[in-house]
Amino acid sequence: MPTLRDDLIEADRNGSLLRVAFEASSPDRHGEDATVAALVSLHTEGAIDAVAAFKKLKNDTSSSPDFFLTRYLFEKALPLIDAPVADVLDCVLRLYRDAGRDLAAGNILKSFSGFCSRNDAYPKSALQAIEHDPDSFIDLLGPVIEAGSRFDRQFYTDQVIRLCRSERIDVRRRSVYSIALIDLSQGPMMSGPLVSSLEETIATETDDQILASTIHSAFEILKKDRSKEARLSTAILRALEKGNEQSIHAGALLLAFSAAELPGPLVGDLLRHMRRASPANGNTLSLIGTGIGELIKSGRQEEGIQLLEALILANPDSRITDNLGGLISKLRRDTALLSKLLTRWLLRGERPLCEAIQSIVGNQIGNEVRLNVDANEMPPAHAPFVARKAIAYFFLFPITAASVVISLMRMTNDLPVLNVLGNLLLNPLLLSYTGSARHYVQKQSESETGKTKEAIDAALKGIDDYLNVLKTIEPLPALYSSEAQREAYQRHMTLDMTESFRVAEKKSVFYGIFGRQTVLYGRKAINYVHGPNGQVARTETELQNHGVDMEIPRMDNIDPAGLDYMLRSFKVETLKS
Amino acid sequence: MKLIIKDYLASLKERGELDAVLPDLLSEIGLNVYSRPARGTRQDGVDVAAVGSIDGGPEKVYLFSIKPGNLSRSDWVSDSPQSLRASLIDIVDSYVPNRLPVEHRDKDIVICITIGGDVQEQARTLITGYTDQNTKGKISFEEWNGDKLADLIQSSFLQEELLPANGRAHLRKALALLDEPDAAYKHFAALVQSLSTTDSQTDTQRTTAIRQLSICYWILFAWARDAGNVEAAYRAGELALLHGWNIVKQYPDSGKKAARDIEAAFFSIFSAYQQTCNEFLGTNVFLHVEKLHGVSVAIRGSCSLDINLKLFDLLGRLAIDGLWDYWGVVKCKEDEKELRELRLQGVQKCANAIRSLIDNNPALLSPTKDDHIIDISFAVSLLLVDAQNHDFIRNWLGAVVARSRFAYVANGRYPCVLQAYSDLLTHPKRGDQEYRENTTSASVLYPMIALFAALLEDKDAYEGVMAFKKENLGHCTFQFWYPDDRSEVHFYLNADAHGAAFSDFSIEQPYSSFLDRVFSECDQTPHFKELSAVKFGWWPIVLIACRHYRLPMPLQLLKGFKSNLPESVSSDDPDSYDVQT
């Protein structure tokens, strides 16, 4: 019976080594480790040339096995084999570039670093090759410096500092980044020249990518050598000041994942510069969101809130909150913080902040959030102002708006203020939503006491009286719109709904995953499922109704312009000092 | 057809209805009606009196005592002096000996018990007993029930030679489709059109045509009222009145018989129109204007557009009703103080209803169509009558300007020149500046508001329009409309376009100059004064035409207001607001 080795040798002969290796690595065959071991031993024995074979791997599913899974075998084998450096450079570079912008693209560089660590001649040869043909190989500088510094730190420190002054910007970019890869773990600390090089680079360079790399490298050195904290903090700050989006992204990375390791004052500087993040850079914002979440978790809540506010205000027409990653769901779970933000931002009344809290609350039709204000964040006298803002921004979610108004009522015993709040509860909320919001307010009234209950009950009486008067009006067919108008409206609505359905369907994640069938009659779908061994099973699938109920605000029919005017007035109103 | 007519007759009420139709019917069958019903007067049991020959028989005097609907035992005899038996006794004992015109005293007298429906069995024997007992000498009795009246109407007004088959078909369809007022109106309009083509007709043909118009409209109204939906009848009434006017205006000399007959038929249409207005506004508007959002909700619109359009329509109707009352006030003679007071109350009632309608239905602050100014103009004209309304007008128009401008800037539903409902449904189209400019390319709304503001010395509203024009509506042609030499021909039938637009003015000037400029144009165009409705003192007909055919209100109607703003309307000051002709 042929062994794995036999299979691989045979495959190498007929040009199918990669496919056979890939299939053999499957857990139900030989598995990854056995396949890698076989590849390594066959390469070492000279039975196959693994480097030459993997050089042919292409990121193209039509002609090659799975690119990343197959490349993974090579990534594991490379640090364990010996081969001519030039061949390895070619192969690694090809596999690195063919991976495109995939997050796993750089994994091969670590393996290459491992390969270079096998023999001090490897990094030297590789460095020569890179310097000889930087256009081709500059991407591989980092692993070479990293591996080389393990053999001769001084030499490679000198080399990287020299390359940081190269005339070629692509060389400088890679070199500055590679500073962070110098192995400082062994022997006496020798970070001084590296720090100086970074300082020099920051002083002379204007390229954003280089400046971003200086931030990365400075922090990596800082982690290893706290004695240079002051200089490195200053260097990072300078780089941030000079740099643009990429530098800010580098800073955001620090904030998101390493804030605890940063000197306190540097965190403040970072936060200040994060405000400059562009809404177009979703990844940067997501990192900043993570960073803010970490700040809040570590007890630096105010600093986190201030950064959040600053970002929102600096980008008034962008939905920054959509790009803050996991931060928003964290805020939704933290009801106390959510109340604080709600109160603070509605009280400030600035549109971007109010829209942001609207977005953060994340109401969904049929599942409206109940909110409370934070009494510590505002004086009771400003309750009507906050209520108007809440109504304006949460108008489509009347239960949320009503919950804010009622929580404001609880803050005060001042009768005029309560009257204003009660009137706002009535108009526009209850007047517009005689269904869900009225029901909510009625239920809420049962659990309230004192003047709050009185104010709520007065509003409820107002809406009951209003509706009772309207009920006295008998049907008046003479006032109804004509048949032609009703039909025209139906056509208009049908077109609108069809279009919105089409747009929504396009956005649906299911649209691209599943096939689509249209069933014209019946309540069940009959299907035959074909099993692996030719057996066929008949299934009946009960069709389900899916729908969403939404209450349209009555006032939008009765007086749309007035309602619009009122809500916009509430939105633009500013607090009189 | 007869069943339709019978049904109609049975549903008529006495006052202003059955007794309004009967004289025309009698005239049409060849009798000479010498006494017609007048409000508040009843001549010893006689509602209508006529003389003449029916079907070639001898000339007789016919005295009609009218009862609406079916005749029951209690209608026949009760304690009320209005009971039929009491009326017949009055006729026999008082009218015949004392009030019968001298020239007819030698003729046989037929006392006609006239009822829209049938005599009920319990009353039958009582009536027969009474008439048998009192039939003596020249006096005899006849029963003119719904069946007989229907026969007469069918054989006189609606016979095939006079009202062709398609005309009757239109009437039947209009009646069948009363629940769909648009369709009913279209059929009735086709009928009206076929009846009122009178240019080459004789006096007799015109008389018959206007009587047919009247009876058909009465039938439509009665059926609509029974169906609980007089919307089609309201619009049909306006049309019938305008077409009726187009006939009656040709007979300025009421001395001639044809003129008298045509005038009588026109009054019959007018009477039915008034009944329709009362029924429509009484049922649909007056009862509900005090209720917050009451009328808006009652409209049950599919969308806000339906509510908006209907509210402005109702506003115009209310205002027209009040202006008719005001017209009535001005027409009252010195000795008609009671009637005058009644009509003043009507003016006040409509003005109050307008205020309440606006207060309680805020969509009236946001016109969707530029031509909503027609309805606004009527309402303002009525409210202007009483100085106590002036602040209300200022606030209302100020809000209209503010909201319109807000809607325009915010790309909400700003007033536009679109007319088709389907276009209005998709209005506005956001983010399309060209569309916005096209749909606001012209306006009567804003200059009219500026005009009212100037009349009321409302600086804020005037400057509001001025700023709106300057900052947002530079592309919009502000204009006024004046009747021209073709207006008299086309105003009442809307057969063709007429009038002239005046756009050569600026509102970037003090409002006194603006008023002078706008009103001096009234003097440049004498055609308003030449309109028959104005000449003959029936100026509300012009307003009906404006409302019905969606034309701006002629500014001449406002001109009088310029020089003499009234403090308030009072019964002592009947000319405080009158048409300047």
Image (cartoon, rainbow, N blue to C red):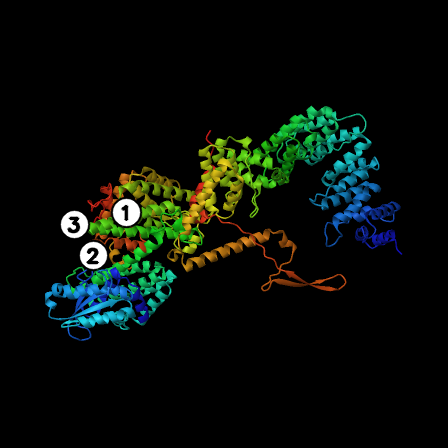
For residue A322, above or below residue B306: above
Mark 3 vs mark 2: in front: 2
- A265 or B349, which is in the foreground? B349
* Residue depicted at 55% across the width and 34% down the height: A374
User: Would residue B111 be found to the left or right of residue A50 on screen?
Assistant: left
Quarter location, residue B515: top left
- A2 or A446, which is in the foreground? A446
Q: Mark 3 points at which residue?
A: B334
Mark 3 falls on what kind of element? Answer: loop
Chain letter of disc 3?
Answer: B
What residue type is disc 2 on?
A: Gly
Checking the image for residue B40, the label placed there is 2
Chain letter of disc 1?
Answer: B
Q: Residues within 10 Å of mark 2 (few under 14, many from 20)?
A: few
Mark 2 falls on what kind of element? Answer: loop
- B457 or A455, which is in the foreground? A455
- B218 or A100, which is in the foreground? B218
Contact between labelled residues 2 and 3, with CB atoms less than 8 Å apart: no
Q: What separation in Å lies between label 1 and label 3 (alpha carbons)?
A: 20 Å
What residue type is disc 1 on?
A: Gln
For residue B107, above or below residue B569: below
Q: Name the residue under label 1.
A: B348
Query: Do marks 1 and 3 share a chain?
Result: yes
Location of residue B132 in the rendering, given as x and y in whole percent from the top left corner: 20, 73
Q: What separation in Å lies between label 3 and label 2 (alpha carbons)?
A: 17 Å
